[in-house]
Amino acid sequence: MSILKGKGEKIIENSIKAVGLLSILPVVLILGYIVFTGVPSISWEFLTQAPKDGMRAGGILPAIIGSIYLTLGTILVSVPFGILTGVYLVEYSKDNWIRRTINLTIVNLAGIPSIIYGLFGMAFFVIYMGMGASIIAGSLTLGIMCLPVIITATRESLLAVPNHLREASLALGATKWETTWKVVLPAASPGILTGVILSISRATGETAPIMFTVAAFYLPFLPESIWDQAMTLPYHLYVIATQVPNMPKANMDGTLFVLVFITVGFNLLGAYVRTKFNKRR
Amino acid sequence: MNIRKTKDLFMKNSIFGIAGFNIIIVFLIFLFVFTNSMKFFTEFPMGDFFMGKEWISLSEKYGLLPLFMGSFWVTLVALGISVPLSLITAIYIAEYAKPKTREGLKVLIETMAALPSVVLGYIGLYVLSNPIKEFFGLNTGLTALTGGILLAFMSIPTMVSISEDSIRALDKSYKEASLALGANKLETIIKIILPAAFPGIFAGIMLGFGRIIGETMTVLMVTGNAPILDAGVLSPVRTLTATIAAEMGEVVQGSTHYYSLFAVGLVLFAISFATNTIADHFIHKSRKIMGK
């Protein structure tokens, strides 16, 4: 009689179920903590004022605006670039060394630790290209970091588009680009959109790549151009949680809530788009 | 007509150029990390770096070993928690959970992956560190254990989703044959499904490992930032990643100290490159098993 039979089977199966549910308990607890401590700390003033008194009072408006600028910049860099690379891989390339090299580089870009992107962004954009710590240097760094996810999502979505759509369009006399732009990309757009949203969610929450490329410790003004430094939500949370003595807890909890609200919100939006898309297929 | 043809040709070439640019970017990342590291090794002996037992930047001691051990302890704790938990969770989701439960669990697991690392660092500082300090009777709750627990949490989504995918992608005939021969469900899972899905599961573990070793902000905030060689699970440590993040802000550009951080970056780069290559290999292997 094996341990996997009879009574043993029941016990082990119930343990599997218990552990399976247990492993998602922390995320529920963490989200609960963030909501319960965060919501009472949020006020209109907190969201619309600049920090005061060495960040111990006032709000987080510059950090919110900085994160929005940086996210928009990241989208501008990574979306056209990532989608067109995906288009190349599926629609234009043959199975040659260039395609294999690009596929290999995507795998490796995806695995590079975020702090290495920070190092590279600082050495290349900030110092070598002379951009200084600025929104543009940070957007380029984060944009590169987002590329693998967007390229992979585009590639998988394009591969799922049935070939008869392409053939019908080409047979009607459309050029290759017209077919890609007007037929194939629209058909693949929900999958691409999901990838874009998920990578943007990640970029908005990243701290390590922007520490040396854009983030300002304490800058109670709004950035005026893409060449300015900016405060951002994740870096601001890091700063007030570790570098500012006697920081009021409510202020930190509020910042935490706003950051999680944005990143998790993006993520749920991505999941929603994907579910809708899967149902339609 | 001619305009359309010209536009088509123009787009074809632009797309080719953009795709090629990706290769240039990876090359540039490697080039900048590599050349800056080489500048470090012209000023500091390579043997003293890789075998050095102390990292004290003020007295120009750049020994990698304490940082390496820091990453080792944190990774050990994280993998010790996340590998068994993820495996069991993946089995549960793929084989036991009802479709509704499965969808709910997957959304929660994705949410887990979406939490920024600075958020987990904050939770570590203000929620987790005190209980750990009290429970083990330590001077500080900022230890390798604290970081490891949080990183386990962070790597579970990667491991679960890849393991679950590879379990579910297995051909049904494996399972049916086993059940037809009289094995029960649990025996089938342990003796047939897990071995067959092993390449995919292993790839998931490698990618989770990659996340753990490369994670920066959480460990910077909760592991106490002490580069000590004879540390352990319950002492403060300093990982490779945290060293770069903690010291890059205050270095003099172009100094030996500045370049030393790139050398640490190169080590990380090498580890993540190896990890990804292995993971990629196993992913291809598992696709072959599934006949895709």
Image (spheres, grey):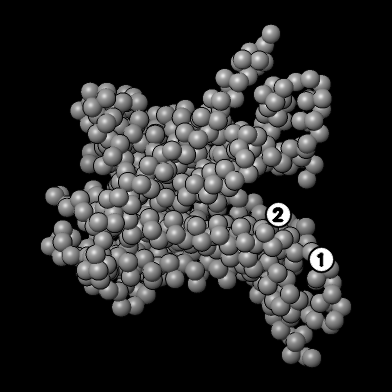
Residue A218 placement, left or right of B145: left
Which residue shows up at 40% across the image and 51% down it? B116
Task: Look at label 2 and name its amino acid.
Answer: Arg
Q: CA distance from mark 2 to mark 1?
A: 22 Å
Say which quarter of the image contains residue A234.
Answer: bottom left
**What label does residue A163 carry, if any?**
1
SS of the residue at dot 1?
helix
- Seen in the picture, residue A185 relative to B81 is either above or below; the reply is below
Residue A218 placement, left or right of A85: left
- Seen in the picture, residue A74 relative to B9 is either above or below; the reply is above
In this rendering, does residue B244 appear at all? no
**Chain of the residue where label 1 is placed in the rendered structure:** A
Closest to the observer: A187 or B46? A187
N-term mark: 2 or 1 = 2
Which residue shows up at 32% across the image and 56% down it? A257
Which residue shows up at 46% across the image and 67% down it? A74
Q: Which residue is mark 2?
A: A100
Q: Indicate the position of residue B231 as horizontal and vertical percent values.
A: 32, 26
Q: Indicate the position of residue A203 as horizontal and vertical percent values.
A: 45, 59
- Seen in the picture, residue B18 relative to B49 is either above or below; the reply is below
Q: Indicate the position of residue A229 as horizontal and vertical percent values.
A: 31, 68
Which residue shows up at 72% across the image and 61% down it? A281
Considering every residue shown, the one lying at the far top of the view is A1
User: Badge 1: few (under 14), some or many (20 or more) residues near its Cα, within 10 Å?
Assistant: few
Task: Look at label 1 and name its amino acid.
Answer: Asn
Which quadrant would the N terminus of chain A be assigned to in this image? top right
SS of the residue at dot 2?
helix
Residue B276 placement, left or right of B257: right
To the question of a shared chain for discs 2 and 1, the answer is yes
